[in-house]
């Protein structure tokens, strides 16, 4: 099994944050990850399918999968 990269671990940690202002999360995605939100969410959806992500943060992966489905 391949370990998660630092950026993949950061993405999972980022998903624990809560956003009250509209558009704040999207702005922070651009600033922190240097990509457009649509690309970030593509990466996130691929990430939560990986067993390594499930092992690293099972509760968040479950929540993210439920939100997506």
Image (cartoon, grey):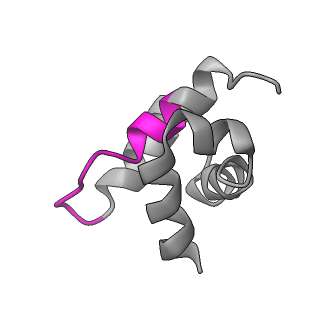
- Residue 21, percent from left and from top: 19, 61
The number of callouts visible is: 0
Where 23 falls versus 4 (above or below)? below
Q: Which residues are magenta?
A: 10-22
Which residue corresponds to the image point at 62% horizontal and 49% vertical from the top-left? 40
Residue 60 in the figure: left or right of residue 55: left
Residue 20 forms part of the magenta stretch: yes
Give the residue furthest to the left: 20
Which residue corresponds to the image point at 55% horizontal and 33% vertical from the top-left? 56
- Residue 5, percent from left and from top: 68, 21
Which residue corresponds to the image point at 33% horizontal and 45% vertical from the top-left? 16
Q: Quadrant of the N terminus?
A: top right
Where 14 falls versus 27 (above or below)? above
Q: Which of the pair 5/2 is nearer the observer?
A: 2
Which residue corresponds to the image point at 72% horizontal and 22% vertical from the top-left? 3
Give the residue furthest to the bottom: 69
State the image quarter where residue 41 is shown.
bottom right
- Residue 26, percent from left and from top: 43, 54
Magenta region, mostly helix, strand or loop? Answer: loop
Q: Quadrant of the C terminus?
A: bottom right
Give the residue furthest to the right: 1
- Residue 27, percent from left and from top: 39, 48
Residue 28 in the figure: left or right of residue 21: right
Q: Which of the pair 25/61 is nearer the observer?
A: 61
């Amino acid at each position: 099994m391949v370990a998660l990269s630092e950026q993949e671990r950061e993405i999972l940690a980022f998903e624990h944050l809560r956003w009250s202002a509209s558009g704040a999360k999207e702005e922070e995605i651009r600033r922190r990850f240097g990509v457009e939100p649509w690309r970030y969410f593509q990466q996130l959806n691929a990430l939560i399918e990986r067993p390594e992500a499930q092992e690293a943060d099972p509760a968040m992966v479950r929540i993210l999968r439920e939100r997506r489905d």
